[in-house]
Image (spheres, rainbow, N blue to C red):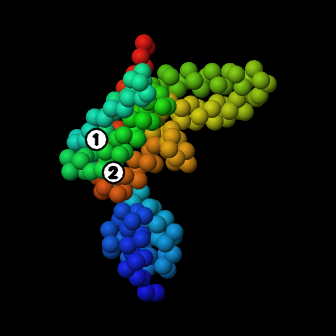
Amino acid sequence: MEISANQVKELRARTGAGVMDCRNALEEAGGDLERAQMLLRAKGLAAAARRSGRVAKEGLVTAYIHGEGRLGALVEINCETDFVARTPDFKSLAHDIALQVTASDPRYVAREDVPADVIGAERAAYAAKARTEGKTQAEAEATADAQLETFYQTVCLLSQPFIRDPNQTVGDLIKGVIARTGENIQVRRFARFRLGE
């Protein structure tokens, strides 16, 4: 099938991928733009997973102040080079993450950051509540595991649904930017401030 320059141009505009990557994805998808976009996304996410071990020491500290200065957040987000840190895509990601922290009040960056004693206490509380509702031990444990997943989505930034697109998590948002920039990106830390607290 012949792939036109307009098709490649449109796919590039949608994804930000390189010309040859777009052409190859369109050829593999038989000219279907939607399928080609999905193929590029899958390849980008796979590449993002490979990049996760690389050192990220450059980046930005970004602030978001809401309303009349009564609520705000500071976020340190890192990448591998200062070149990427200066790109609009990276700056937009940093702003969106600071906005997410301000709006959602997470306590931890990732699931791995939640202390074991906090997880144990939460699981025990969920299981005890389920047992008081008359569930068997196995049912109580299954209920506790399901509620623990909801707990992670509430308190862990990377597991939270992104406030501008609840169909993706903050972690998925970051992986998408990793796929476009070609660098490892990590949220190093954050702090949320509310006036009077």
Instruction: Judge by depth and name the residue closer to the eye, 70 or 92.
Output: 70
Quick one: SS at disc 2? helix
**Among numbered discs 2 and 1, the one appearing first in the sequence:** 1
Q: Which of 119 and 9 is in front in this view?
A: 9
Q: Are marks 2 and 1 in contact (CB under 8 Å)?
A: no
Picture residue at 42% right of the left edge, 29% below the top: 66
Task: From this view, report whether residue 36 is shown above or below residue 174.
Answer: below
Residue 26 position, x and y percent, is 44, 76
Which residue, as the protein is rendered here, is positioned at the far front? Answer: 68
- Secondary structure found at label 1: strand
Q: Mark 2 points at which residue?
A: 89
| 182 lies above or below 172 | below
Compute the Cα span from label 2 to label 1. Answer: 13 Å
Please give the name of the residue rendered at 42% of the width and 21% of the height, measured from the top-left corner: 70
Q: Is residue 105 left or right of residue 84?
A: right
Residue depicted at x 75% and y 20% = 132
| Residue with the most extreme left position | 82
Q: Which residue corresponds to mark 1?
A: 78
In depth, the one of 191 and 68 nearer the eye is: 68
| Residue 115 lies in quadrant | top left
Name the residue located 25 percent from the left edge and 46 percent from the top edge. 85
Which part of the image, by quadrant, shows the C terminus? top left
Query: Residue 182 location, x and y as percent?
Result: 30, 56
Q: In which quarter of the image is residue 114?
A: top left
Please tell me whether mark 2 or mark 1 is closer to you in this view.
Answer: 2
